Image (tube, grey):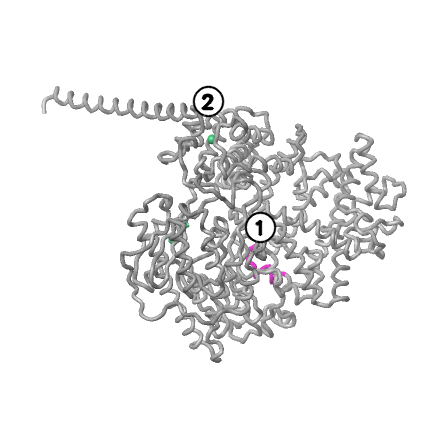
Amino acid sequence: MEANEKVKIVMSVASIVAVTVLLVAEYRRRRYRKKQTSSLSSCYLHSELKPQFGFKRVLADNSYSGFKHLKLDDGSSSIEKTSNCHPYETEITALLENPKLEFGFLRGEYSLEMNDSYLWIETESQLKELAETLAKEKVFAVDTEQHSFRSFLGFTALIQISTQDEDFLVDTIALHDSMSILRSVFSDPHICKVFHGADNDVLWLQRDFHIYVVNMFDTAKACEVLSKPQRSLAYLLEAVCGVTTNKLLQREDWRQRPLSKEMVLYARTDAHYLLYIADSLTAELKQLATEDSSSPDDKFHFLLETSRRSNMTCLQLFTKETEDFPGNAAASSLIYRHLNGHGDNSTISLDAEFQEHVRELCAWRDLMARIHDESTRYVLSDQAIIALARKQPTTTEEIYDTIAQTDMGAESSPSAVICSHLNDIYQMTRDKLANLDEILPVVLQKCLGTDGTCPISIFNYSLLVNFSTKLTSRSAPKQNRHKNLKQFTRKTSRELFVKKFSCKAPVYHNCRIYANDGRLLCYCDRRKLEWYVNRGLAKLVEENPPAIMLLFEPKGRPEDEGNDFYIQTKKNVCVGCGEGNHYLRYRIIPSCYRVHFPEHLKSHRSHDIVLLCVDCHEVAHAAAERYKKQIATEFGIPLFVRRVLDSKEAQGTSSSMEDESNGNSEEAGVSPLHLRTAAMALLRHGNRMPSSRREELLQTVKMYYGGRDISEEDLERALLIGLSPHERRKLERKKGASLKHSIEVSLMDKQENNNKGQDETNGGEGLAGFEKNMNVESSTVADDSGNGTSEGDGATELNDTQCNGNTLHQQNSKLSLLGHGPHGKQIVEYLLREHGEDGVRDFCQRWRKVFVDAVHPRHLPGGWNISHSGRRDFGEFSVYNPTKRLSTE
Ligand code: AMP
Ligand code: MN
Ligand code: ZN
């Protein structure tokens, strides 16, 4: 090749490259301008038609109000009523107690093959016909497909129903408003519905159609009971039917019509084989019983177990996630993940501006997603939020580019919401002084107000009504700097708290214990397995995850006690909201009562210790504190130490304050924490603080001393009230140095340094409820880890009974910390005296109810229930048997 030819080639290649680069840049600019111009005129929703906007009736809208469940009435009114209870609780409970035994999923000849014919149901008359067909069946199979990307709460896009003879695909977009036609067949206890992994489906059906499933057989639960190596439908299809399926299709956009051939095939496959699979698993379940059991009565045992677990799923209720401020949960989780990604770098963890930006963007994203009925991840990705918060771009173009670069290549990014609302996001991020409580209502007004930019729809119209209550219930409308600062301090200490106290390793190991006949007894942690194995009471039967078999006959079986709880795996997530990034243990029955229970009633804590994220923890704890007050009034046993008339008594421990109760319980006393912080503030700042504040604090201390005038000595003595002997000694030891300093340090220690940034003159009441509450629990969480038992449900169970000496000491320190020790003791003594152990059991149930009412937990392990007996001993050789314990330790 000649030299000038080479040059020519090089030149032309170079020019092609240059032109391409220019074109790409131009394309991006145009794309940007196109999106920009459209944003200036109006919101994208004016031109984009989303299928859900055709729905006339929506049960779960995007407002912050709770979900209303169907309420059955006597038929006198045609208007559907709503409630917060499961409308078919009675029917399902009846099934749990009296399961139907006639399990026959297939009749006569059955061909496994799937032919080409299926029925596409898209009109109301077709749907009615389907309902009539199904009403004649004893059993049918169901699956649903969801769309969640371009919708805030997600919606059911397709329901697949298969009888032995036909496959039906119900177009639930076209028929969204008519789906109540199928309600009665789903809730008919005489018709069995076969699902695979129905946990989500039952909630989705409630959410979209008020359809409640009664009488279900879940093939995934059957796998569980059969200890199958896998539980997925793909596995069963392959193992039982020899059919392969491409699960990737699960993620297709199920809104599209018509569905592609592959999607139709996939959708039919998910329901078509379920009856056959159920039939085959049923045979296995029966077989297992005859092989393993000595008594022929047990023939249906495993089958019943499967049926019971399936119907437990039906009892679940759909709820809308709640949070105390828009986007809060997402923001916390994002910040937490981000901090974790950066290791232990405290400069980043305290980068207040970054965190504020993340919170602001998450709140905005949450609101925009609700307004436009989009998922938050469609509106703005997590990575984009981090990038924006870090970079803090200063122009709309920069904002756009930051997002585009972060989500490189993602077709839907920057989203239509971002493109139509670039100016809004720009204004919000630029306006550094404004606070969210003020910004969000403005955003809402701008979008949905009288001259709003975005269309009002069935999904968003009640946002306008609900929104202001959401904000005002959170805090007073009047905001000032001081308040913002406090909120900020609160947030920061929350982050630190999560970092410090949330469980570092997964709590549940999900190791299994089998009885000597191979039946599953419970899930537990590794320590418990070792305990049995080391004593020659069990042998290891599986390695990973480990499982042991007991070599002795356990006294009771979980199923004998109607107790499903112990044979469920437990997820390492917050049982309230499902948060999996951080969680801490929460004791449903407050320690101040529990430590005084008879030993055998508290040996099984795993039921009443659950994992909660910080937000749910806070809610649960606040409710528990309120309920304690109610208990105090009800029983006439005060929560707090009462006044001491003679100053000599104040030298004693808190137990010396237990004089007889005289009616009005709660007002009569003062909490040790309040007392100590008030005394400390007076000692340190007494002269400097405003007289009104000083008077207030004095009143607190005076209340303790029975109203008499108090001296400086009294104040110093008050600093010791409620401390354990150990804590007192610690305080004394430090007295060599400046008294003031030592007191400060000691009390700070006590409070886990949580309130360091607080204004000390506020005498403790200014501690955000959060820190104050968390003190109590954090110390108990810390206790656990101090014992080396931070991992494991079984471990915490052991903890209670294992080492008496140690426990006693812990109990004492807990008593003083909680300040409700004497109250708890008296309550438990009263219960035992008046009602015996049943009194204690009822009492536990009350607390479980308080917990459920406060948190509305959606992720409790299956089998968890309010009326849990708390009784469960394995007999003579049990790790929980107190006499055995002493001899084997
Ligand atoms: P299936 O129970 O497999 O029929 O799934 C029902 C619906 O759940 C699907 O239509 C999806 O919307 C959703 N889904 C389940 N698993 C996934 C997954 N791994 N990724 C995305 N979506 C999923
Ligand atoms: Mn499916
Ligand atoms: Zn809009």
Please identify the quarter of the rendering in which residue 632 is found: bottom right
Residue found at x 72% / y 43%: 746
- Residue 533 visible somewhere in the drawing: no
Q: Amino acid at mark 2?
A: Thr
Residue 761, numbered label: none
Height in image: 428 above or below 176? Answer: above
Residue segment shown in magenta? 790-799
Residue 546 position, x and y percent, is 46, 63
Q: Are marks 2 and 1 in contact (CB under 8 Å)?
A: no
- Please tell me how crowded label 2 is: few (under 14), some (14-19), or many (20+) other residues with Cα within 10 Å: some
Q: Amino acid at mark 1?
A: Thr
* Label 2 sits on residue: 395
* Label 1 sits on residue: 82
Residue found at x 24% / y 25%: 17
- Please tell me how crowded label 1 is: few (under 14), some (14-19), or many (20+) other residues with Cα within 10 Å: some
Please identify the quarter of the rendering in which residue 745 is found: top right
Q: 159 or 845, which is in the foreground?
A: 159
Residue found at x 55% / y 24%: 431
Height in image: 789 above or below 322? Answer: below
Residue reaching furthest to the top? 4
Q: Does residue 793 belong to the magenta stretch?
A: yes
Disc 2 versus disc 1: nearer the observer? 1
Residue found at x 85% / y 56%: 659
Residue reaching furthest to the left? 1
